[in-house]
Amino acid sequence: MQTYYYVVYSNPVEGREEEYNAWYSNVHIVDALKIPGIVAARRFRLAGAQRFGPPYPWKYMALYEFETDTPEETLRILKERSGSPEMVVSDAFGPGHIGFVFEPITPRLRSEQVR
């Protein structure tokens, strides 16, 4: 099976960050992990230290790891469930989010491997 990474960039609706974070961390990720093939998920917030200056279009990132021979099927199920009772989408989830699927092209290297 191949491992894929689904990276989602998003923002909360203005003034609803607390609600957005509670939903994303406690509801949405749990629902996503029920999709066949999705094996891990983690959320991130944009750090204060950045290599380049603003603008920064997104404040939050979610990273989903999925293992499958058919990524199209995993994405089909995700699309089918999104907004359904199986995967409720909060209205605190801002518009303009975007997601991309990546597949690895190199093995994971650690610094001690290249010293």
Image: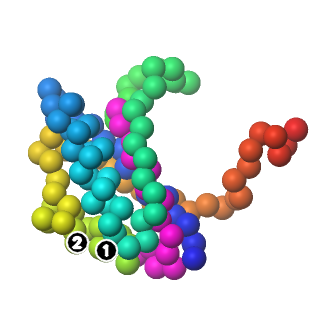
Left-right relation of 65 to 98 = right
Query: How many other residues sit within 10 Å of disc 1, few (<14), some (14-19) or many (≥20)?
Result: few
Q: Amino acid at mark 2?
A: Glu
Left-right relation of 85 to 81 = left
Magenta highlight range = 59-72
Q: Quick check: 5 above or below 10?
A: below
Residue under circle 1?
76
Specify the quadrant of the image occupied by residue 86.
bottom left
Q: Residue at x 88, y 38 (%)?
A: 115
Q: Position of residue 54 (x, y in %)?
A: 41, 22
Q: Residue at x 51, y 64 (%)?
A: 4
Q: Is residue 110 visible?
A: yes
Q: Quick check: 17 above or below 37?
A: above
Q: Amino acid at mark 1?
A: Arg
Q: Residue at x 51, y 20 (%)?
A: 49
Residue under circle 2?
80
Q: Position of residue 26 (x, y in %)?
A: 26, 46
